[in-house]
Structure formats: C-alpha cells, structure tokens
Amino acid sequence: VIDIRRLYAQTGLFTYDPGFTSTASCTSKITYIDGDAGILLYRGYPIEQLAEKCDFLEVCYLLLKGELPNGGEMKGFVTNISQHVMVHEQLSRFYSGFRRDAHPMAILVGVVGALSAFYHDVMDINSKEDRYISAIRLIAKMPNLVAMCYKYSIGMPFIYPKRKLGYAENFLRMMMGDPGDDYLANPVLVRALDRILILHADHEQNASTSTVRLAGSSGANPYACVAAGIACLWGAAHGGANEAVLNMLAQIGDVSRIGEYVNKAKDKNDPFRLMGFGHRVYKNYDPRAKLMRETCHEVLNELNLHDDKMFKLAMELERIALEDPYFVERKLYPNVDFYSGIVLRALGIPTEMFTAIFAMARSVGWIAQWDEMISDPEMKIGRPRQLYQGVTARDVKYISGR
Ligand code: ACO
C-alpha cells in the first residue's frame, strides 16, 4: 500500500483510478472483505457465524459499537430502538404528495432526507451522543418508512409498529398486515428476513457507502447523507440487482433458454449482463450468496414450494455459467443478490420493494461508517481529482464574431 498523499506532497505525483478499483478512500475498523478467499467479517466476526448465532439488532449493535452485546446491553439497545420506531405524523403526510405508482426508492430518498427537518434538535455532528441518537432513530424508523411506501402504493392505511415485536417481525406485520387483524408472521420467514438484513448490513466501501461518506465529509447531516446513499443504491449495478435478477429470470422463462442468455451476456456488442453475477471485490463465491442459497432452500421447503420454477432456473443458470470459461476466467460468481430476490418473492414481498428492503438493512452500515468517518481525526472533505482532457486555454470572442 502506497500512501499517495505523502508522495503527492513530495513529488506532485497523483493517480488515475476511475471507479476507485485500487484506491482506499479511508481506513476503517468495521468490515473486512477478502475477495479472493470469499471472506466477509463484521468487526472480525465471520458473516456465517453472525447469520447463525445473532439477530439483526445484535449485528446493528456490533456494527455501531464494535462489540457484540451481552444480555443486559442488548435489552437496553432493544428498548432504545423500540422508543424510536414511530414516525412523526407530519412526516406520514409526505407520502400523500407522491403519485401512488412512484417507485418506493423515489419516495424513500425523499422521506429519509426529510428526517433532517424533524430532528434538527439533536443533530450536532461533533457530538458523539447526538450521532448515536441519529443512528438509533434511523435504524428504528426505517422499517416503518419502508413499509409505508408499500402501503401507500396499494392504497392501504399505514400500520403502526408494535414495540414488543422483533425488528423483522414488526416489518413483516407493517407490510403484510391489515389494520384490524392480528397478523402472525411465520417464524421461518421472520428468520429468513432477519438473515437477509444481516447479510446486507454492511459491505465496506461500496458505492452507496462511499456516497454517504463523501456527502458526510462536508459536514452534511446524517439523514441527508443516508438519503444520498439510498439514491446511489437504487442503481441496477448496485442495490437494484436483486430486482433485476428476478426480471431477468422471468425474461429467460425456461431452462431451455439459459444458453441463449449466457451467450448474450458474453457478447461484447450486447449490453446485457447476467444480473446477480460478478462483484468488484469478490473474485470467488460471495459468502453471502452461499448463505442466501441455503435460506432459499429453507423458505421454499417451509412454504412447500420445492418445485419453484424461478429457483430451479436460478440454480441451473448458476451451474451453466460456472462451467463456462468466460465466467471462470473472469472470476464471475453469483453475488448476494442472485438468490435474495427469490427469497423475498417467496416471503410475498413485491419486486419493486426489494431495493427498499436492502436500504433498510444497509442503513446501519451507512450510519456506522458515517460515524466512524466523523470520529476520525484525519477526516478531510472528499475531493477526488481528475485528468483533464478538454481543450487547452483559448480566448473568448464576442458573440458577433463567433
Ligand atoms: N455478466 C457478464 N459479464 C460480466 C458480468 C456479468 N454480470 N460482470 C462482469 N462481467 C465482465 C465484464 O464485461 C468484463 O469483461 P471484459 O474483461 O471482457 O471487459 C469483466 O467481467 C470485468 O467486469 P467489470 O465491469 O470490469 O467489473 P466491475 O468490478 O467493474 O463490476 C459489477 C462489478 C458492477 C457488480 C458487475 O459484475 C455487474 O454489472 N454485475 C451485474 C450486476 C450485479 O449483479 N450487481 C450487484 C453487485 S452486488 C451488490 O451491489 C450488493
């Protein structure tokens, strides 16, 4: 690793690195990825163990505070979160300003950004305590804000959260329940959603997290920074991938057509890519994709959907692609989103909500990274350089002479 800042100060040398493929923008103690070995650790703990032994809120505590909570600490944390699950009634009214057919991510960018208009009382970014309260507020309110996007889109009344329910269960109830009923979520499905949240909670300096950090580096408030992260996540190359995977599988339609689509993905004159395949950092099987495939099996078994056409299609596509020299040479493996869409669909969640659920999960990562950045004494405003390739200096003529 070369500290290019020192080299620049001494020699004026700087690097050209579009897409930041080989430039670290910060130091971090939160998440570690070894892309060649397919390893992902949150604060040193393997993702496989966290997915097995913890729930999402324990992982939130870990990401925010650096250590897993003991029983007493967890109780306090859960109480703290549950005190902040409600959304200000005036913020609820924002939803009616959107068209019903608006994409949930379009609404989410707006309402999360608007949180800064409600909580400016506790938003001193130089206060550790204020930063922590902002984090709690964001994590607590996200399920409610996301579920409201859905309820609004189908013309149903919003469902208030129940403080005594777990995080994933509360979300499923707010999404799927009716105001009068006693919605009881299936524990296998609750656990599957919880696992999706754990697997998406953080992923070091991906595009949306880097966006949050860049926005925050100017001193912007946390909700505005997270709204910027949500905007970035929306793109099909990032958080929109699981939605794109399902659309792709629907387009392929049948196992007999997989070869045709694999060939399309290999054709350099065709912009089509296999969605849910490839990753900037993983040049091995994404460890989250393995866990997601297991979860997929569990959920489909629970729901007696062993013969789910999409799942069979996905597994066959994976098999064929992983035997194809094009994908092998480029180390293109399924990423987390290859199977997460199938699980979410089995949970009854409509496709257009997938990225919003990803945003709900990633909010803790964004806010933990934002907090880490603000606490860093070396923090500087983010200001990438460029290689100018336009025309050289020239004189302006008056319009009559041009
Ligand atoms: N299908 C076909 N070819 C691919 C794919 C794919 N899904 N992904 C990469 N390639 C090819 C590229 O065409 C390129 O080939 P070349 O060397 O012959 O030009 C080579 O593999 C390297 O690809 P890059 O685009 O340089 O890799 P990069 O690291 O920039 O992109 C990305 C990573 C964006 C994830 C890419 O693999 C992709 O578009 N995948 C599909 C979208 C997707 O699943 N996104 C989710 C990412 S995970 C997440 O956000 C949670």
Image (tube, helix red, strand yellow):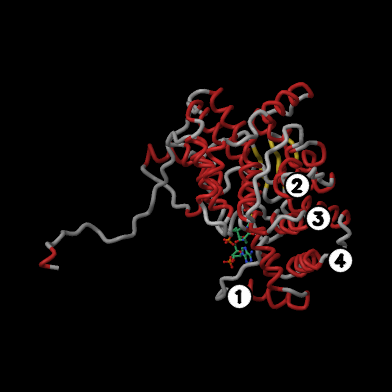
Image coordinates for residue 279, horizontal then vertical, percent: 64, 56
Badge 1 crowding class, 10 Å Cα cut-off, few under 14, some 14 to 19, many 20 or more, is: few
Residues at marks 2 and 4, CA–CA distance in whole angstroms: 21 Å
Residue plotted at (12% across, 62% down):
398
Residue 193's label in the rendered image is: 2
Q: Earlier in the sequence, mark 4 or mark 3?
A: 3
- Mark pair 1, 3: CA separation: 30 Å
The residue type indicated by label 4 comes to: Asp
> Does dot 2 land on a helix, a strand or a loop?
helix
Of the residues under marks 1 and 3, which one precedes in the sequence?
1
The amino acid marked with disc number 1 is Asp
Residue type at mark 3? Cys
Is 93 in front, or is 364? 93
In the image shown, does 34 or 290 lie closer to the viewer? 290
Per the image, the residue denoted by label 4 is 307
CA neighbours of label 3 inside 10 A, class few (<14), some (14 to 19), many (20+): many
Q: Which residue is mark 3?
A: 296
Can you say whether 364 is above or below 189 in the image? Answer: above
Q: Which residue is mark 1?
A: 267
